[in-house]
Image (tube, grey):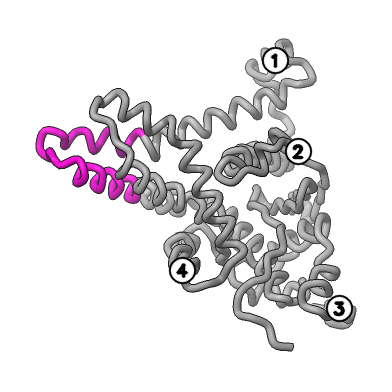
Amino acid sequence: MKRDKGNRYSGIGGQAVLEGVMMKNKDKYAVAVRKPNGEIDVEVDVYRGIMHDSVWKKIPFVRGVFNFLDSMVLGMKTLNHSVSFYEDEDAGETAADKVMGKLFKDKAESVMLGMVTVFSILLAVAFFMILPYYVTSLFDEYIRNASVLAILEGGIRILVFAGYIVAITMMKDIRRLYQYHGAEHKCINCIEKGRPLTVHNVMRSSRLHKRCGTSFMFFVVFVSIIVFFFIRVEQPVFRLLLRIALVPVIAGISYEIIRLAGRSNNIFIRILSAPGMCLQRLTTKEPDEEMARVAIASVEAVFDWKAYLKETFGYEIDESWLVD
């Protein structure tokens, strides 16, 4: 059977968590975690997200903002779930836990999750948006050309982003997380290439994927450079406020680009996706077969890949193919 070289869009996505993988298909998601005793725990739940069924989530360039927030919230939630398997059982309740419990009772966990998500977003804005602007402002006395300053700020933003990725890659504990990240991508690529979801096929699939969060972050940096080059104000305070105010706009544009990248394979999209794919060589690592099995368990909990292959590629799975 002849297939095209590009992946066929499946609609599933995910992320790596501590010793596991989360996979999401529409409103349903699963978190598969390799427990300390070696067993694979799979939890399946539904996450409808912010502004569920709202017309705002269907409007191009607006929906990206809500989808980004949803991915942050769900990412934090599933990461916390995976961490719970490796927490010290003897660790007692902290003072912060007690205060949150008294103030918000059964909603304490959700409130804490929201606070962590907001803090993470603010930290990212400060690190990737405000810091490059501040560093560039130090050259105001020496560079009078606004266009040159805008290019300089863009270059510093790229360096900060690349430096951040390289720095966390050097952390020992991050390597296993990146291996599970690779396993997640390999599973999706395996399915979208029309291959049965077996450990053998997963392991020989690519660990790079155009819809990766790393690529999304690259697009955010890239789009911000273009936006700030053409949209300018003179007063320093307003320039800073503008960078903060335009973050949702930049996120919305970046979402549309990566959404298009996940559904197209023309030469323009491949060129546009190339830098993000290169960065994924840092944020993904080759998994072992046990990691692949965890990722497969997560996929199969939320996605009928056999029906997908039949509908998309036109063939039924022979069970004898599934023996590794």
Looking at the rendered image, the quarter that the N terminus falls into is bottom right
Residue contact between numbered discs 2 and 1, judged by CB atoms under 8 Å: no
Q: Where residue 39 sits: x, y (%)? A: 81, 55
Q: Which one is earlier in the sequence, the residue at label 3 or at label 4?
A: 4
**Label 3 sits on residue:** 317
Q: Residues within 10 Å of mark 1 (few under 14, many from 20)?
A: few
Mark 4 or mark 1: whose residue is earlier in sequence: 1
Mark 3 or mark 2, earlier in chain: 2
Determine which of the numbered discs, if any, sits on residue 268 in the image.
Answer: 4
3D distance between C-alphas at marks 4 and 1: 54 Å
Marks 4 and 1 in Cβ contact (< 8 Å): no
Specify start and end residues of the magenta stretch as a single range: 130-159
* 265 displayed left or right of 157: right
Q: Nearer the viewer, mark 3 or mark 2?
A: 2
Q: CA distance from mark 2 to mark 1?
A: 35 Å
On the image, numbered disc 1 is attached to which residue? 98
